[in-house]
Image (cartoon, rainbow, N blue to C red):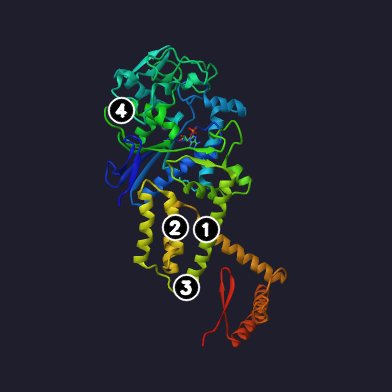
Amino acid sequence: MSLYLYNSLSHKKEEFVPNEPGKVKIYTCGPTVYHYAHIGNLRTYMMEDILDRYLRYLGYDVDRVMNITDVGHLTSDGDTGEDKMLKGAKREHKTVMEIAAFFTAAFFADCKKLNIRIPETVQPATGCIDDFIRVISALLEKGYAYEAGGNIYFDTSKLDKYYVFHGFAEEDLEVGVREGVEADENKRNRADFVLWFTKSKFEDQELKWESPWGTGYPGWHIECSCIAMKYLGERLDIHCGGIDNAFPHHTNEIAQSEAYLGHLWCNWWMHVHHLNTTSGKMSKSSGEFLTVSLLESKGYDPLAYRFFCLQSHYRKNLVFSYENLDNASASYRKLVLRVAALLREAGASADKEPDAEALAALKKRFTDALDNDLNTSLAVTALYDALKSPASPATRLAAVRDFDTVLKLGLEEKAAAQIADEAEKEKAAAASGAGQSFSDDPAVRSIEERIAARAAAKKAKNWAEADRIRAELLAEGIVLSDTPAGTQWSRKEG
Ligand code: AMP
Ligand code: ZN
């Protein structure tokens, strides 16, 4: 089967075909670095990460670019409200550039904890002002933009088609009005949006640049179009972001990019739906500010949160609650223990080579799931299927390793750590001789006690004694084998 991806442009799943065979160019709207990312934002980046990793898994050469919004994003996406960066800087009593650097680093740290791959190119908006000015100048020249009240606006009435996503209506443009913020009198059409601010209500705007229209700063939407075109050229394969970005941000990105280029810009639009709390929208300002660090401080493994997210589909809203996360954490823990058991089994088995046919059958379930619009919950089911399949341990382990290059649940690392931890505990118990529980069966107990005594002798580097115990047990038909999880014993056959 080929990869089918839902496309917000056509409102249906379509077979994914890149512009250039074997190559995929992806643009991702990055974070506005005025605060920590909440776990909802990170759900979006995680599901985009699945897309990125799965395309690589399929053998595509992926080139991915992400912006960092460090200027121009106002508290309302409709060009009204406060500048988010300025607001953040005031809150932290720092400069805009200081908070941008701090929260960009914090974002990368969160990505690392969640195994989210950082795209090859990450570009802060403030580093591309010349590119924005060049594109805005061209839009003015082509008649797609106008100057009013000192600002430059994009003229949406010049387009044949503006609302490209799911049936947004004029009322949606009244976001600012609904939030009690004044409408911009300079706009010729309600849908018009700012490309460059010079005269603004932000007298204290920290970051300003010279432009042909006066000292000012860019509107939010222009950065993504320019950064994408700068690094990925005139044609994008996939553009992604959270569903709230579809309108007006992505709608405006399409409007200005296609007006500038004169042709279709991006074939696929992928939108990740929201993570909500039981009381509604996730927020950075009210209620509990849910960050990865907060989850960690409560004892949760960030990868258990990744597991939680993978259990649902990216085009469905997901409700976060501690109860839901507890359930996911318990399942994740069990999963790690199962992989640890498999590692031991595969280590003990003489058969080290996976069976190609059986492995291909297991992989097919996995790719069938992800080929169907990245159905991660079915991909997780395929992982469980692999674990419980009758295939050899080497085959099952190869499947787990293979699937985890996409799912990135850190299964083998966590399982190996689990085994090492158990071995450490056993060693400590053997050394102290205390706290070790032995079987009630006197025959078994005698064996276990001598194994513990042997471990203590080894720890004390008393090799002669350790060998003597091994030989003694062997004489009784008990064979010992030392594994990373400690010494195992079995009865000699025959
Ligand atoms: P921002 O830093 O506010 O620009 O948002 C970063 C990313 O998170 C964007 O792609 C948003 O669309 C996305 N996003 C915002 N809120 C949520 C949420 N509650 N759940 C999932 N994604 C979100
Ligand atoms: Zn964007």
Report the amino acid beneath label 2. Answer: Leu
Residue 359 place in picture, x, y as percent: 37, 63
Residue 389 place in picture, x, y as percent: 43, 65
Work out whether mark 2 precedes mark 1 in sequence or the reverse, and give the earlier one: 1
Q: Quadrant of residue 237?
A: top left
Report the amino acid beneath label 1. Answer: Leu
- How far separated are the C-alphas under marks 4 and 2? 42 Å
Q: How many numbered circles are shown? A: 4
Name the residue carrying label 2: 383
Name the residue carrying label 1: 335
Tell me the crowding category of disc 1: few under 14, some 14 to 19, or many 20 or more residues within 10 angstroms, Cα based. Answer: some
- How far separated are the C-alphas under marks 3 and 4? 59 Å
Q: Nearer the viewer, residue 40 or 421?
A: 40
The disc at residue 349 is: 3
Which residue ends up furthest to the front in the rendered image?
278
Tell me the crowding category of disc 3: few under 14, some 14 to 19, or many 20 or more residues within 10 angstroms, Cα based. Answer: few
